Image (cartoon, grey):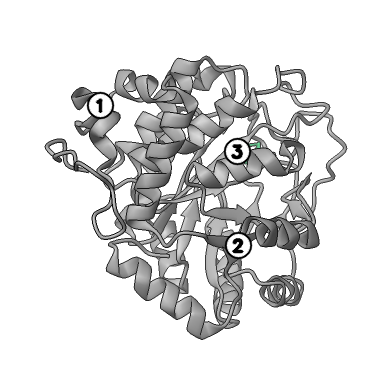
Amino acid sequence: MSPTATPSATPSASQPLQLHRRVAPAALQGPWTVDAIQALLEKPLMDLLFEAQTVHRQHWPAGDIELATLLSVKTGGCPENCGYCPQAAEFDTGVKAEKLMKLDEVVRAAQAAKDAGATRFCMGAAWRAPKDRDIEKVSALIGAVKGLGLQTCATLGMLESHQAQALKDAGLDYYNHNLDTAPEYYTDVVSTRAYQDRLDTLQHVRSAGISVCCGGIVGMGEAPVHRAGLIAQLANLQPYPESVPINSLVRVPGTPLADSEPVDPFDFVRVIAVARITMPKARVRLSAGRQQMGEAVQALCFMAGANSIFYGDKLLVTGNPDVQADVQLLAKLGLNGHRTTTTEADDLHAHAQSQGVCA
Ligand code: SF4
């Protein structure tokens, strides 16, 4: 986004509306300041939605929604203490610790996800940081899932640089590692690692040439300035992530954040819109919490520029709308979920690359 973009007089199909006409010049400067992002968050909602949708259409085909499926390949027993997570060993949430799934089980799940229309398959493991022997096993999973014609994503905890390189060599397309919230609020959420640890892993992933999936969670008791701080961190990464999952906290009994005040749905929509405006080429993913949102709020999120959802009945260990409900919702809204064929995936990839991002 150029800070010097000149507002167009009248928008038309051939001359898209310049998005910056209603944004104060200071907000257009990069890097993004927390103040500038907070100013966006505070705009009248209709103005914010209009701007976000305008940015969206300048960078993405209208109505295009990526369907990603997430499988927990190694559940529970995690030594970290993320306050939102039912998989932390120290919280009594009823989640049982399990071993890494076998290759044939993962391939079956990936094939089912592909048959249901997913284009990307994400594998999550509840580790603080995988050992090298874990990386070897996950590399085999990555190769097998890729062999089905799916894009691959993994979220395994903190990585060292040689581990990131090994995953790249195995064919990993994306690595997910969320920043969760602003640095100033981080210690209220987790104390077993530092914000800088997250940034270091993200750097290793980037250096290995793996695309970055990185976002955060809204509704953990954070102040609006922390939401702005999270978006500033994400938008100022060089380059910003290709995928940005925005989660609404699922308040799981037994976790320290179980009694958090529910987030106002419009505030959640605002965060999606500001993610879209500040990271125009990123896939902004409407992630956890959709089950509690209802269709109207999800529709507003798509209006705000979300163009990816997690698809499937479960998100790691929390619930997600069932596949049929999602199919119906997308149809009602006239949105196109990606139906997977290799050709369509290739076309999408080519399109995204032509816009300077991976799909
Ligand atoms: S979010 Fe990840 S790192 Fe944190 S406790 Fe859960 S599984 Fe462990």
Amino acid on which the number 3 mark rests in the picture: Asn
Q: Is residue 7 left or right of residue 353?
A: left
- Residue located beneath label 2 in the image: 67
Q: Position of residue 199 (x, y in %)?
A: 38, 38
Is label 1 or label 3 in front?
1
> Could you say which is closer to the camera, residue 182 or residue 5?
5
Badge 2 element: strand
Q: Residue furthest right?
A: 94
- Residue located beneath label 1 in the image: 27
Q: Is residue 114 visible?
A: yes
Work out whether 182 lies above or below 1: above
Q: Position of residue 25 (x, y in %)?
A: 19, 26
**Mark 1 C-beta closer than 8 Å to ligand 1:** no
Q: Earlier in the sequence, mark 1 or mark 2?
A: 1
**Mark 3 C-beta closer than 8 Å to ligand 1:** no
Residue placed at 44% from the left, 58% from the top? 163
Q: Position of residue 292 (x, y in %)?
A: 76, 37
Amino acid on which the number 2 mark rests in the picture: Leu
Residue 139's image quarter?
bottom right
> Could you say which is closer to the camera, residue 90 or residue 302?
302
Badge 1 element: helix
Count residues near mark 1 (Cα–Cα under 10 Å), then give few for <14, some for 14-19, many for 20+: many
- Residue located beneath label 3 in the image: 247
Q: CA distance from mark 1 to mark 3?
A: 25 Å
Residue placed at 66% from the left, 59% from the top? 330
